[in-house]
Amino acid sequence: MRWRRCGEDAALLDCDSLEQMRAAHATVLAARPPGVVDLVPGARSLLVVGGVAAVRALLEDADLAHPPADEPREVTLDVRYDGEDLALIAADAGVSPDAVVSMHTEAGYTVAFTGFAPGFGYLTGLPRPLRQPRLESPRTRVPAGSVGLAGEFTGVYPRESPGGWRLLGHTSATLFDPHADPPALFAPGDRVRFRSVR
C-alpha cells in the first residue's frame, strides 16, 4: 500500500488489490477513527478525507487478511434476462444462455464501490466464466435498469447513459432517487442478489 497526499486534510491510499481495499475500508468503518469526514472506496484505492493520521496509524497495525466482520444490508433485484448481449456472453462463456442466467442468479455479490453515475455500484462476486471484456464499441445509449457485466464486475445502469458493458437483462428497480433517503440503493459493503423473473 502507498499513501498519497490529497490537499490539506485528505489522502489517497493505493492498494495492491480490490480485496485489500475492501479490507482497509471495512477496518476504518469498524473503528471509526476521530476526524474522518468521508471515505471513498475505488477499485484499488481508498480516499480518506479528514483524520488521515489516525487512519494511517490504524491501518499500519491492522490485520487486513482478516478484516472485521460486518452485518451487511442485503438487496435482491428482480431481473428479466433478455439483454442484447446474452447470446454473446453465453458463447464466450461456452455455455447456454440459460446457464448464464443460472450462474448470474446463483452467485452472491458485494458492492465494492460506487461511481460512474449516481447510484451505479460495482458488484464483485461474478462467476469466472462471466468475467468478460467490455464491448469493442460502446453503445451511445444504454437504457436505465440495464444489468450488465464487464471484467470482474456486474452492475446496473441507474439511468440512461452511454456504456460499454455487456448487457444481460433489465430490472425495474430504482437505483438512484435524489428525493429518497439515502438517494442511492447501493452502498459499499451491501450484499446483492439477482432473481430471474419473466
Image (cartoon, grey):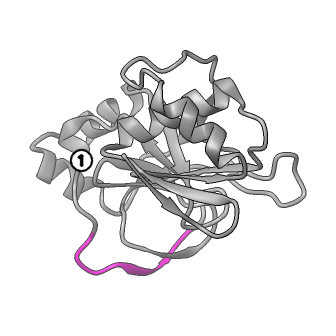
* Residue at left offset 29%, top offset 54%: 86
Residue 134, given in percent of the width and then of the height, sits at 28, 66
* Residue at left offset 78%, top offset 43%: 35
> Which amino acid type is marked by label 1?
Arg
Q: Does 116 sit above or below residue 56?
A: below
Q: Classify residue 133 as left or right of residue 30.
A: left
Residue that carries the numbered disc 1 in the rendered image: 131
Magenta-drawn segment: 135-143
Residue 159: quarter of image: bottom right
In the rendered image, residue 88 lying in the magenta stretch gets the answer no
Number of residues whose C-alpha sits closer than 10 Å to that of mark 1, classed few (under 14), some (14–19) or many (20 or more) = some
Query: 76 or 51, which lies in front?
Result: 51
Q: Is residue 108 visible?
A: yes
In the rendered image, residue 139 lying in the magenta stretch gets the answer yes
Query: 143 or 50, which lies in front?
Result: 50
Residue 23, given in percent of the width and then of the height, sits at 46, 31
Q: Does 67 sit above or below residue 166?
A: above
Q: Does 170 sit above or below residue 142?
A: above
Residue 60, given in percent of the width and then of the height, sits at 46, 32
Q: Is residue 196 visible?
A: no
Query: 195 or 119, which lies in front?
Result: 119
Q: Classify residue 160 as left or right of residue 19.
A: right
Residue 30, given in percent of the width and then of the height, sits at 65, 24
